[in-house]
Structures are given as C-alpha cells and as structure tokens.
Amino acid sequence: MTGFSFVGVLFTTVDLWNNWLKNVAVLFFVLFYVMAVYFLNSFADYESDIKSKRLKIIGSISKSKYISLFVIFCILFSSLAIYINVKAFVFSASAMALWSLYYLPPLRLKSSYLIGTIIHFVAGILHFHSGYCSYADYSQSSFAVSVYFALLLSIGHFHHELMDYESDKAAGNRTTAVRIGIDKIHYLRTGLTLLTLIYWIALFFRGYTSKTELCVFLIPTAVLLILSFALRQNEVKRFQKISRTIFLVAGLFLLGIKVIALAKNYF
C-alpha cells in the first residue's frame, strides 16, 4: 500500500539535495500512515484473521496492543503530515477516516455489497495525493492520474476478496465475494483490469502522462490483464506475487529515471 502514496511523489518534481529533511519526513509519514492502517486492520479482523492460515501470525500479539499501536502511529503520521503541509494531513486523515468506516462497527462497510471496493477506489485517490501534495498542489492532471492508481487498488481489493473468501465466509463477513460468489468476483476483477488498461492509454492521448510514464505502467497493466485471464481462480497467491513484483519493478524503474533526470539538472 505504500506504493500508492510514493508513486504520487514520482509525478512531482522533488529536490533530492536541498530538501532532504522534508524528503525524510515524507518517507516516514507514508510508512507510519500505512502501518497505522494495517494495525487498524489487524485489530478489526483479529478474530477471523487468527483462524486463517495466511494471516494467523497476527495472533502473535494481543488484540488490545493493535489498537494501541494504531493510536500511536496515527499520532506519528499526523504530526509529520502537519510538518510537511496541511494538504498532506487533510488527504491522509480523510483516507484514515474512510478506512475506519471500512473496518470498524457500527457501519463496518467491509461487509457491504461493493461499498468496500468503492472505499478502496476513493482511498487510492487520497493515498496518491498524500504523496503528491507533499510537494505540489493538486490539479486536474493529478486527479486524472490518481484515478488509474485507484483502479489498481480496487483490482487488488477484488483479488483479496478472492483470497479471503473461505475465511470471510466462515467468519460471517458479508463481503462482495461472499454475497455473489468467487466466479463473479473473478469476472469483475478481469473487467476492471481491462478498463484500467484502456484508461491509462486514454490518459496519454489526453496529455496527462508522458511517453515514459505511459510505457512504464502500460506493460505491467497489460501483464495484469493477461494474468487475470490466464490464471485459474485457485492460483490467487501466484497472481498476487506476480502482480506485486511487476508493479514494484515499474515503480523502481520510474524512480530511477526521475533520479537520473534530477541529477543531470542539479549537476
């Protein structure tokens, strides 16, 4: 999840040498924010997660400690966000409010039909701008680009519902996958991936992205679509591993390009 904020930074111009203190603050701001989200997740889903083979390690510490860690890291990321600028705080705090509605009762929107995916989509836009607005003002262009990454986060949410189908069903979590079945979620994930690919290409022709940015993310999105078609529904872990790897490589490649360009300008 850290990537959705850090990639926002990559779509701005960052001074790596003269603004190093702010850069360090942004780094820890994003890390502390994401840790707070995961501590909230672990607290809210503790009972069901400790029964899951994939997530049972969460039971290594008590449920009460997760809520304490959540509060501590909320204070940490909020303090850093305020130091960076008000916009970074507003976007990150708004996203955290959404995650609280998603995980916590009385609403616990995680169990609402499609609402969980909508929350991931909106949170994706907010996450992107938490990083982006640490260095630049939001704009029509930043919003357009953030929608692409929000769609990727929504695809990831559909995939996690596939991964957690059995444990969610056993725990009584009425997620979209539990409500409509894994076959339809698979089709939704594939359809949304195709839409995301088309949208990314359209952004380039509308002038919102460069040729470099187009190519860097076009290839992994196309691979993601192929995986969604080719892999069987019981190969969810393989889908996750490959998709995470290709987008990590894409992000690091774009980072390398940005660093080289900044170094040339500086020297």
Image: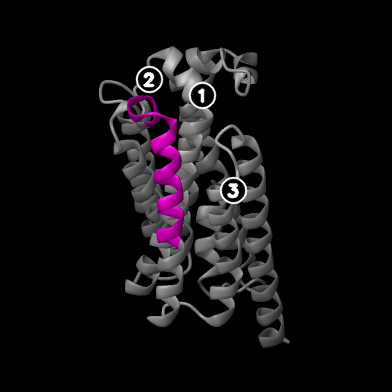
Picture quarter with the C terminus: bottom right
Q: Residue type at mark 2: give it.
A: Asn
Residue, disc 1: 42
Which callout, 3 or 1, points to the residue nearer the camera? 3
Q: Residue 230: give its label.
A: 3
Which is nearer the eye, 203 or 188?
Answer: 188
What span is in magenta? 177-196
Which is nearer the eye, 261 or 47?
Answer: 47
Q: Residue type at mark 3: give it.
A: Ala
Residue sitting at 44 percent across and 58 percent down?
A: 194
Q: Give the spatial CA distance, label 3 vs label 1.
A: 32 Å
**Which SS class for mark 1?**
helix
| Label 2 or label 3, whichever comes before in sequence order | 2
Point out the residue furthest to the left here.
107
Whether residue 23 sits left or right of residue 74 in the image: it is: right
Q: Residue type at mark 1: give it.
A: Ser
Q: Quadrant of residue 139?
A: bottom left
- Tell me where residue 140 appears, x and y as whole percent: 32, 72
Residue, disc 2: 173
| Label 3 or label 1, whichever comes before in sequence order | 1
Residue sitting at 30 percent across and 30 percent down?
A: 109
| Label 2 or label 1, whichever comes before in sequence order | 1
Q: Residue 5: give its label.
A: none
- Tell me where residue 138 appears, x and y as whole percent: 36, 68
